[in-house]
């Protein structure tokens, strides 16, 4: 199966949030979004935008769940925000019940998704955030299955950039 890629150059955290918000407005139940990139590359900023697009209220502050592993936010769909940074193995993530969350009625977004190894769902959107200057980032989007491909096609068609 072909995995088309799209890249976007973000010039600010606000631009990163806007791109993610556009994706959040379209994400259907069962969507899994895997975020990859070095520390400080904007993964949590991306989730903040995704939450805005999913109509998560401002009272629910979106922060990285570094120590709690998982935060849940209420919007048009539940948003499950995972941070896998502190996990030592994919088995540890499986023991936390990720399958029930990722297969559920909401959207799951995983920071440090590369730590899950082969335990990641097959149908997912992968977003890699790379430094392109002190404030700029390159965001590369890749779909690995039919649902993810449909979402990225709709996102590219609707994106106001």
Image (spheres, helix red, strand yellow):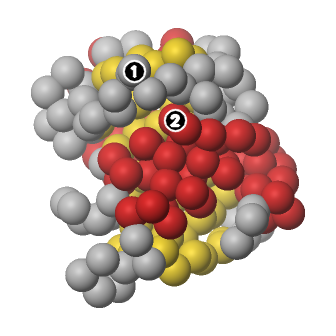
**Of 10 and 70, the residue lying toward us:** 10
Crowdedness near tag 2: few (<14), some (14–19) or many (≥20) residues, C-alpha within 10 Å? many
Q: Is residue 12 left or right of residue 51?
A: left
Determine the CA span between mark 1 and mark 2.
12 Å
Residue 77 vs 3, above or below: the answer is above
Residue mark closest to the camera, 1 vs 2: 1
Query: Could you tell me residue 97's position as x and y percent?
Result: 40, 14
State which quarter of the image contains the N terminus.
Answer: bottom right
Looking at marks 1 and 2 on the same chain, the residue that comes earlier in the sequence is marked by 2
- Could you tell me which residue is drawn at 76 percent across and 56 percent down? 155
**Of 61 and 34, the residue lying toward us:** 61
**Of 17 and 34, the residue lying toward us:** 17
Residue 134 vs 45, above or below: the answer is below
State which quarter of the image contains the C terminus.
Answer: bottom right
For residue 67, say whether it is visible: yes
Report helix, strand or loop for mark 1.
loop
Q: Label 2, on which residue?
A: 51
Report helix, strand or loop for mark 2.
helix
Q: Label 1, on which residue?
A: 59
- Could you tell me which residue is drawn at 18 percent across and 34 percent down? 66
Counting labels gives 2
Q: Is residue 156 left or right of residue 50?
A: right
Whether the residues at callouts 1 and 2 have beta carbons within 8 Å, the answer is: no
The quadrant in which residue 14 appears is bottom left
The quadrant in which residue 30 appears is top right
Q: Is residue 119 left or right of residue 54?
A: left
Residue 142 vs 74, above or below: the answer is below
Crowdedness near tag 1: few (<14), some (14–19) or many (≥20) residues, C-alpha within 10 Å? few
Query: Could you tell me residue 45's position as x and y percent?
Result: 37, 51
- Could you tell me which residue is drawn at 61 percent across and 29 percent down? 55
């Amino acid at each position: 199966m072909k995995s088309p890629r799209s890249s976007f150059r973000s010039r600010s955290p606000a631009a990163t949030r806007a791109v993610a918000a556009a994706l959040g407005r379209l994400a259907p139940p069962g969507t899994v979004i895997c975020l990859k990139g070095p520390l400080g590359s904007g993964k949590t900023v991306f989730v903040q935008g995704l939450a805005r697009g999913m109509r998560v209220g401002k009272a629910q502050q979106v922060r990285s769940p570094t120590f709690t592993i998982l935060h849940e936010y209420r919007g048009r769909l539940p948003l499950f925000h995972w941070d896998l940074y502190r996990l030592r193995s994919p088995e540890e993530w499986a023991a936390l019940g990720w399958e029930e969350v990722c297969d559920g009625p909401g959207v799951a977004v995983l920071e440090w998704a590369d730590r899950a190894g082969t335990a990641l769902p097959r149908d997912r959107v992968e977003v890699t955030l790379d430094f392109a200057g002190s404030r700029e980032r390159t965001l590369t989007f890749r779909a690995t299955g039919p649902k993810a491909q449909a979402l990225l096609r709709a996102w590219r068609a609707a994106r106001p950039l």
